[in-house]
Image (cartoon, rainbow, N blue to C red):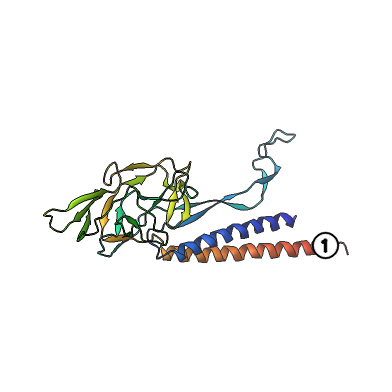
Amino acid sequence: MAVIALQSASSGLNALSTKLDVIANNLANIETTGFKASRVNFQDQMYIERMQPGVENANGDQRPTGLYVGLGVKVSGTQANFDQGAPIVTNRSLDLTIDGSGFFQVTVEDGLAGDGVAYTRYGAFALTAEGELVLATDQGRRLDPGATIPTDATAVEIDQEGRVLAMIPGAIEPQEVGQLQIATFVNPAGLRQVGENLWVESAASGPASVGNPAEDQRGRIRQGQLEGSNVDPTRELVELIRTQRAFEMNSQSIRAADEALQTVAQLRR
């Protein structure tokens, strides 16, 4: 009956609506530093088995195919793309990029992450009144492990290995005032997204492996630049058009099924 067609097309509209939401979020964050685009994965749902393949008839011949009617589609999950975004040169000493794998660590409240640590590719930092490095966001998350820049420092240099060097008046050589560390994961796609450009650990991501930059396949620190969003606007617009067309086709399926049911209902008159 056309009732199954209504249900299948309805599941298609629901799944495509979710894909549209994800595309819209990707496009909205096209200028967000360190943002990672997501894609939607689909999977078909259960099937009604009306005839089994391989069933023998009276002559011993086997049915070569079965008869299955699907019950539509559903979203199986979203998957983040962790390809590195293009560098944006700022020449600001507290703007950092991880060139390669890894995340900066910041401290958050326990309600956001069970161990009080979140991870980010957002590399725009600022200083507190005490000289501590924090994210230049509305929450000002503190870098962990961080560095405290002397208030009288005239210049700050952060090398590729994450050493934080400050030039102090009267000193001949810059002084090391901190060591940045970055975290990597076996499965970064398993991290939970919690907003603010932050990710938190989950059972799927595995535990964080923390160490100095440029060690054990961790990325290097690049000072004076930021990592741009990795959203590809051309690809997202193409996916947007495809989603619109698929949505329209599923709508047509609902109209066709509705007309078929109306025809059946009129047969009783």
In the figure, residue 32 lies in which quadrant? Answer: bottom left
Q: In the figure, 58 relative to 179: above or below? A: above
- Residue at point 42% right, 40% down? 207
Which residue is at 70% across, 33% downward?
Answer: 60
Residue 170 at what x, y percent from top left? 12, 57
As displayed, is residue 179 above or below residue 156? above
Horizontal side, residue 19 vs residue 47: left or right: left
Q: Position of residue 132 (x, y in %)?
A: 31, 55
| Number of residues whose C-alpha sits closer than 10 Å to that of mark 1, classed few (under 14), some (14–19) or many (20 or more) | few
Residue at the (54%, 59%) spot, across then down: 19
In the rendered image, the residue lying farthest to the top is: 60
Task: Identify which amino acid the numbered label 1 is placed on.
Answer: Ala
Between 29 and 201, the residue placed more toward the observer is 201
Residue 231 in picture, x, y percent from top left? 41, 61
Return the x and y of residue 9 as percentages of the image width and height.
65, 58
Kindly identify which residue carries mark 1: 265
Q: Is residue 159 visible?
A: no
Up/down of 102 relative to 138, above or below = above
Q: Nearer the viewer, residue 225 or 231?
A: 225
Could you say whether the residue bearing mark 1 is in a helix, strand or loop? Answer: helix
